[in-house]
Amino acid sequence: MRKALLLALSTTALSSGAFAEMLDVEKDELKFGFIKLTDMAPLAVAYENGYFEDEGLFVTLEAQANWKVLLDGVIGGQLDGAHMLAGQPLAATIGYGTEAHIVTPFSMDLNGNGITVSNEIWEQMKEYVPEENGKPVHPISAEALAPVVKKYQSQGKPFNMGMVFPVSTHNYELRYWLAAGGLQPGYYSPQDVTGQIGADVLLSVTPPPQMPATMEAGTIYGYCVGEPWNQQAVFKGIGVPVITDYELWKNNPEKVFGMSASFVEENPNTAIAVTKALIRAAIWLDENDNANRMEAVELLSRPEYVGADADVIANSMTGTFEYEKGDKREVPDFNVFFRYNATYPFYSDAVWYLTQMRRWGQIAEAKPDSWYDEIAKSVYKPEIYLEAARHLVEEGLANEADFPWDSDGYKEPTPAADVIDGIPYDGRQPNAYLESLPIGLKGDQTVVGNEVKG
């Protein structure tokens, strides 16, 4: 009945040139999960703009309590797919934590995170941060945090910071920043999954919306999180974002849309149709130099989506980012949803996450370069993405030139100038990359007890 209704509707819509050509989807009633962050925007836009319905899909979007509940929902089939941390499908597939084969045909965004410290910590850091015209020079290195951490250590106080999940971009970005400034963020081992072995800074999990309150309470001194929870600290007057991930690693990959491999195998047309709708949403979010962003801000501010004040969300979604109160700067690419091939699931992005898992001991033993490539290809599915893109181009809903048709799945190496520590990244050579990082496991090294061996 529903398909018949949509087909009837499509006749009218196609005559106006505003309707996608529907695939014969295997499952048309779907439930997708998300966490209350601005980078869930493609899901909200695809739903509100009718892109899912254009594909013959009746979608329910449901906020989840935390990343573990969300992942379990996809694995257990309560959710057909979800806005996920990029590390989640990879970790599940290699059996780190919960074991399950999760795949992604769609990368949801680039950039979008920040590292915030409390006002008290910022006041102590400031004397180590160079200034120009009375304002801090960005990007701010963790070298400015190191003396503060050492002071706390000398007083016997642990220096605690928060991140959102052990396999989150935020964990790896915070670790990257700390290590680039000479601070040890700690190792994982099969026996100790706290990630605090040998750490100068103790990192622990806090759900994104709770970050500002947890810092205000003094439980953590800072955190790495996605928006709007860095800007929320500025608005509340309780903290200062010291660096965005755009400054940490220019145009780094962020969330993905994940589905179980079995769901995709059983519902191939449905997977393509979902990807089509999400690509259209990403195009809408970035088109005409972000002309639709204020409309997106209004949408995301609704309680069923992110539920933060529109002013807070707009602070980072509309081309600016506020550091100290009143220090608002132009960061036009802080949130990227489509340009720079943001939505294409590059194998090299997957490999970077895997290198960070290895760097900090979540992957306990050395793996050959071929292993990284194999895992990336088992999780990231550009073939589904490109099939969806081909349909959109043929339907006049996307431009041929906007997709990397001839890519082998690996980006050109990230140049040294685009990374805070000046170390380039080539996804084709993961072990050579690990060797180039001064802090972290490399070669055959393993964590045994509280020590790095090998």
Image: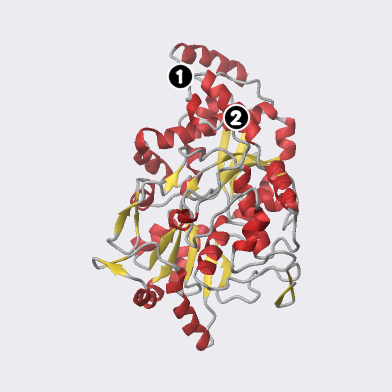
| Numbered disc 1: secondary structure | loop
| Numbered disc 2: secondary structure | helix
The image shows residue 24 at horizontal and vertical percentages of: 65, 20
- Give the labeled residue for mark 1: 18
Judge left or right: residue 159 versus residue 28.
Answer: left
Name the image quarter holding the C terminus: bottom right
Q: Determine the residue positioned at 43% across, 54% down.
A: 228
Name the image quarter holding the N terminus: top right
Q: Quadrant of residue 56?
A: top right
- Please tell me which residue lies in front, 114 or 426: 426
Q: Is residue 66 above or below residue 52?
A: below
Q: What amino acid is found at the position of numbered circle 2 in the picture?
A: Leu
Q: Determine the residue positioned at 60% across, 69% down.
A: 439
Q: Determine the residue positioned at 76% across, 62% down.
A: 365
- Please tell me which residue lies in front, 389 or 69: 389
Q: Is residue 281 above or below residue 26?
A: below
Q: What amino acid is found at the position of numbered circle 1 in the picture?
A: Ala
Q: Can residue 274 be seen in the rendering of this structure?
A: no
Q: Is residue 153 above or below residue 132?
A: below
Q: Which mark is residue 114?
A: none
Q: Determine the residue positioned at 65% across, 65% down.
A: 360
The image shows residue 132 at horizontal and vertical percentages of: 27, 66
The image shows residue 124 at horizontal and vertical percentages of: 38, 78
- Give the labeled residue for mark 2: 386
The image shows residue 359 at horizontal and vertical percentages of: 65, 63
Q: Can residue 190 be seen in the rendering of this structure?
A: yes
Q: Is residue 101 above or below residue 215?
A: above
Bin the neighbour count of mark 1 within 10 Å (Cα to Cα): few under 14, some 14-19, many 20 and up: some
